[in-house]
Image (cartoon, coloured by chain):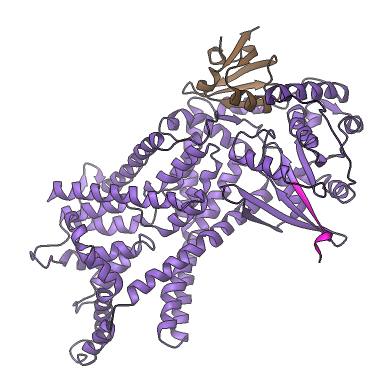
Amino acid sequence: MSDSTNKNIVLVGNPNTGKSTVFNLLTGLNQKIGNFPGVTVDKKTGQFKIDNIKYNVVDLPGTYSLIPNSEDEKITQQYIASITSKDLIVVVADVTNLKRNLLLCTQIIDEGKQVVLALNMMDLLQKNKQEINIEKLKTEIGCPIIPINARIGKGIDSLKNAIVNHKITSLSFLPEQSSNNIDNTILRFKKIDAILNQCCSKKGEDSSYLSTKKIDNILTHKVYGYLIFLSLLFIIFQAIFSWSSYPMDLIENGFIWLSDFVANTLPKGVVNDLIVNGIIAGLGGIVIFVPQIAILFAFITILEDTGYMARVSFLMDRILRQFGLNGKSIIPLLSSTACAVPAIMSARTIGNPKERLITIMVAPLMSCSARIPVYTILIALIVPEESTLGIFNMQGLLVLGLYLLGFVTALLSALVMKWLIKAKQQSAFTLEMPIYRPPRWKNVGIEIVSKVKVFLFDAGKIIIAISIILWGLSSYGPGDSFEQIEAKYAHNTEQLDESDVQAKIASEKLEASYAGIIGKTIEPVIEPLGFDWKIGISLVTSFAAREVFVGTMATLYSVGNEDNTKSIREKMLAAKNPQTGEKLYTTATTLSLLIFYVFAMQCMATLAIVYRETKSIKWPIIQVIYMGALAYIGSFVVYTIFS
Amino acid sequence: MTLDSLKENEQATIIAINNDGLALQLLSMGFILGEKIKLERIAPLNDPIIISSGNNYISIRKKDAQQITISKS
């Protein structure tokens, strides 16, 4: 199809006008999310087709005015400036707040663009006891005006008709403009007021905000408000922690089955190993996050859609602001205890760029669920399961302590960054409090799908690449070191059974691999923390995901045990320091290692998503360095105190 | 007097906004010089506040409210 049969439609409107619902209605699931070059704002594009003509629809970020105040608004303004008269702008306006919405609409008309005005929320107009003479409004403003109710899909066909049959007309609203933006805006409002006085008539008291005020009396109450919010957080927490475990188990078992199947079907060799341990393992490590991302974004979309998110910000802003964060930061921070990946994606709801950046930077310090297996195995080394402090289980208390340590450090780091990071723009914190409305379930579904897509495709590429590199590092060694190991055991099979030999070979190969060499190379650096080269290898392989620590330990300590049923825990307990002959996992070393795992940035999925969300390689690098420094210093202090 | 000194449910008129950026931002959100403004609600921790003008309801921090000169009517 040639370009001349394509037409571009651009959707513009104030926030909370139902613009994204209109976009979904026009394009269905036929949409994708891309980027505006160089900035952190998503560009949603989609298509629809009528009479063999393809209409490309672009959804621009919500904006109140063409005079930009934020990054989002700057993009909208620049994008509109670049549009030609062949393209059409559909302004979606909230009919219950027409005066404010017409500001943007008339600004766009005065830019000389082709405009169709869609008046949304016509259903609320009756509730407001208002009437609008649309024909009269049409003649006053000049552009086609289509009343719609996007929530139930009413009027979308007429909107499509208006788009298809649009004829280029030259319009102007405010012919004489001064150079002062404020004066201009006031003039514009005066003219809009005059027009609305002629076209609108009130038939009674406006009651649209009454029920919202009543709900707010409870939801922003000094006691109930916080109680309700805490209970909601608890439900979200519960959902991403326990509900998600069923699909996650399914995915995990699915990938185990797949890798077994491929490993046994393909001929043995490098390709088999690369596919099984590099690619499938990497893919599994990505897909496993999908349930948590889907559940978290279902909740977040519902909270946003109903208007509750603005109240969360209102309730929490005072507390979190002191740490350079935002009222809305509480959602990413708490979600981060499940997984930092969806948490960092959810920081997008924070409008202020500096506060959003700080939230992204500190969220991975919250102890995520991948740290739990590491905490469990290490704590079991130093605290017997049955030991208690009063009525509390000691192991449980220690885990709680680690969580608190992560949380407090996140807040303190945020405080430091508040002073260090310069704000790009000194924008005031203004947030619209929309009226409460029921969630649009279709919208929730579309939002989940699009967030999962962004994660799988944008972060997924980076994660797969790093997985393959890590696989290479631990499956290859310099020269013929691997062949020598195999040759050594080829003659030695009489005394040991087959599985023991395999385990020994795997362990010695890991030691001789590049990962092993890295472990040994960094040994002098990590020695002051009480770590040996085996722990060094685990620190390297943990980069794929923290829980890999357990697997690596299993491989490394599979040496020399006739009894294969011994748990990794027992093997680690029995491990000796080769120089002193003393126990390796002393209280000091174990605590030091625990502290290291609380602080260190050992998660490539998180780094990939931080890169994706900040659009800069600078922030993930800073994150690795500052969290690494915290980990090193923290572990060093703890090791020195306890040894 | 400035906007942050209003009590809940008190009304006033905006006289001036002493910061052009904030003025433009509020203006485009429907808060217009010379029009009525109402303090709807103060957050439980005393900051931020919700203000309204017509059908526009927004939350702003007190620090920003101090930039807004009002006259009580």
Up/down of A587 relative to A411, above or below: below
- Residue shown at the point (60%, 51%) measured from the top left: A37
Residue A2 sits inside the magenta stretch? yes
Q: Residue at x 44, y 44 (%)?
A: A334
In the rendered view, does A29 fall on the left or right side of A467? right
- Which range is magenta? A1-10
Residue B30 seen? no
Tell me, by letter, which chain the rendering colours purple. Answer: A
Which quadrant of the figure contains the N terminus of chain A? Answer: bottom right
Residue A104, percent from left and from top? 74, 33
Up the image or down, A531 lies above or below A85; here it is below
Q: Is A201 contained in the magenta span?
A: no
Relative image position of residue A312 (x, y in whole percent): 53, 34
Q: Which residue is drawn at 58% across and 24% down?
A: A217
Q: Which residue sits furthest front?
A: A179
Look at the image and give the colour of chain B. Answer: brown
* Residue appearing at x 61%, y 21% in the figure: B51
